[in-house]
Image (cartoon, grey):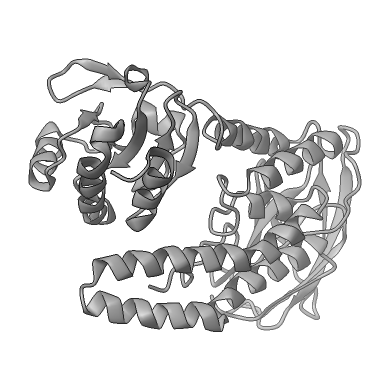
């Protein structure tokens, strides 16, 4: 159960910064990128960013110097002879970049970039979570439980693991909360492996206010504001957005028609292995608590009605089902900002969101807390 081994970096060699200068006027500013290529090859060194495409010319001693004109901070991609590529965040600081230039895994050295320093620091902190003795112990216990097919223990350990992981990640969240607007902060806030938008909504909300103040016209601010707006729509305490989709008989069923009950909105699909493995837990909870006012509203992200109906039958899902059979292009998936499943949201009787992604015993515990023992 190594949940940390895939650190999906938005840019492989970047990181970010302390306090930044406020926006300059539309004429922009110049930054000097200089450095050295240790092992030059045949071909060209290409540099590009949005609206920018140019080449870098080496001096006789294999050094280079390139003046970049910016009207907002930008990520530049530099391709050395088609053999080594580097992405680098550029703001107001002059930067030194030294590379081998002859190998995909060649050495990269970046100096003078506060963005790079912050991004690398956050990345190192995240990778370091894997070395936590408590997490390693839970992983060992998880493997034993999995081999023994002890599903209850597996779910208990999964919950324990994620709780410990969140506790450890708090140091990264605290670091980001202290930062001023920067490219690195922008990309770190958008990395779901580091910042869970549901659990860290306050960080996102406070950060976007900083961006609006210091970077009011930059595109990054609008993108981040849109992210926060979407996250707010499904934040704990908010009334869940309406869902109105066809059931298997073709009749449109509204989520709001279930007001007066505690409702689990469950996003799933036949093709989703984790969803299918979680279904028995939901089935058990449904039969256990349906008499106390609990209902499940399943939203399938399948593509075909045949797959959808087959999975409903195979898994014994005897509750409300809806789908527009549009995969992740489903209107409900867009409204709830769904980019991975399984994903579930628990609503109270008034339609307000009270919990998210309760799996296994955690769902039972929450239902017992709000509905009482069956």
Residue 44 at least partly seen: no
Quarter of the picture containing the C terminus is top left
Residue 365 percent coordinates (x, y) = 39, 52
Q: Is residue 47 above or below residue 148?
A: above
- Residue name at image x 19 percent, y 33 percent: 319
Residue 100 percent coordinates (x, y) = 65, 80
Q: Is residue 364 above or below residue 137?
A: above
Q: Is residue 348 above or below residue 9?
A: above
- Residue name at image x 11 percent, y 43 percent: 316
Could you tell whether 168 is left or right of 339 in the image? right
Question: Residue 84 appears in which quarter of the rendering?
Answer: bottom right
Q: Nearer the viewer, residue 141 or 286?
A: 286
- Residue name at image x 24 percent, y 41 percent: 286
Residue 193 at least partly seen: yes
Quarter of the picture containing the N terminus is bottom left
Residue 180 percent coordinates (x, y) = 83, 50
């Amino acid at each position: 159960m190594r949940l940390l081994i895939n650190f999906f970096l938005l840019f492989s060699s970047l990181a970010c910064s302390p306090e930044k200068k406020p926006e300059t006027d539309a004429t922009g500013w110049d930054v000097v990128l200089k450095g050295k290529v240790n092992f030059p090859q045949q071909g060209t060194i290409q540099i590009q960013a949005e609206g920018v495409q140019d080449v870098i010319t080496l001096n006789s001693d294999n050094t280079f110097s390139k003046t970049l004109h910016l009207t907002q901070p930008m990520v530049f991609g530099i391709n050395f002879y088609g053999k080594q590529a580097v992405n680098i965040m550029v703001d107001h600081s002059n930067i030194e970049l030294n590379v081998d230039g002859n190998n995909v895994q060649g050495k990269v050295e970046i100096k003078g970039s506060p963005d790079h320093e912050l991004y690398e620091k956050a990345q190192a902190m995240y990778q370091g979570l894997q070395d936590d003795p408590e997490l390693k112990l839970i992983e060992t216990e998880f493997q034993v439980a999995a081999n023994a097919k002890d599903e209850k223990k597996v779910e208990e350990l999964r919950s324990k693991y994620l709780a410990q992981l969140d506790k450890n990640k708090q140091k990264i969240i605290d670091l980001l909360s202290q930062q001023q607007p920067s490219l690195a902060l922008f990309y770190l806030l958008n990395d779901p492996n580091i910042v869970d938008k549901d659990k860290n909504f306050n960080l996102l909300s406070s950060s976007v206010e900083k961006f609006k103040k210091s970077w009011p016209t930059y595109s990054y601010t609008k993108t981040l504001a849109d992210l926060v707006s979407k996250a707010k729509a499904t934040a704990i305490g908010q009334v869940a957005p309406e869902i109105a989709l066809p059931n298997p008989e073709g009749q449109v069923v509204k989520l709001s028609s279930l007001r007066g009950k505690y409702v689990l909105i469950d996003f799933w699909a036949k093709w989703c292995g984790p969803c299918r493995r979680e279904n028995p837990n939901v089935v058990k909870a449904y039969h256990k608590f349906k008499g106390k006012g609990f209902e499940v509203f399943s939203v399938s992200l399948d593509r075909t009605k045949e797959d959808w109906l087959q999975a409903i039958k195979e898994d014994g899902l005897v509750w409300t089902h809806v789908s527009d059979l549009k995969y992740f292009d489903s209107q409900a998936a867009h409204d709830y900002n769904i980019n991975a499943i399984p994903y579930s949201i628990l609503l109270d009787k008034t339609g307000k969101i009270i919990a998210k992604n309760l799996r296994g015993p955690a769902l039972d515990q929450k239902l017992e807390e709000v509905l009482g023992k069956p």
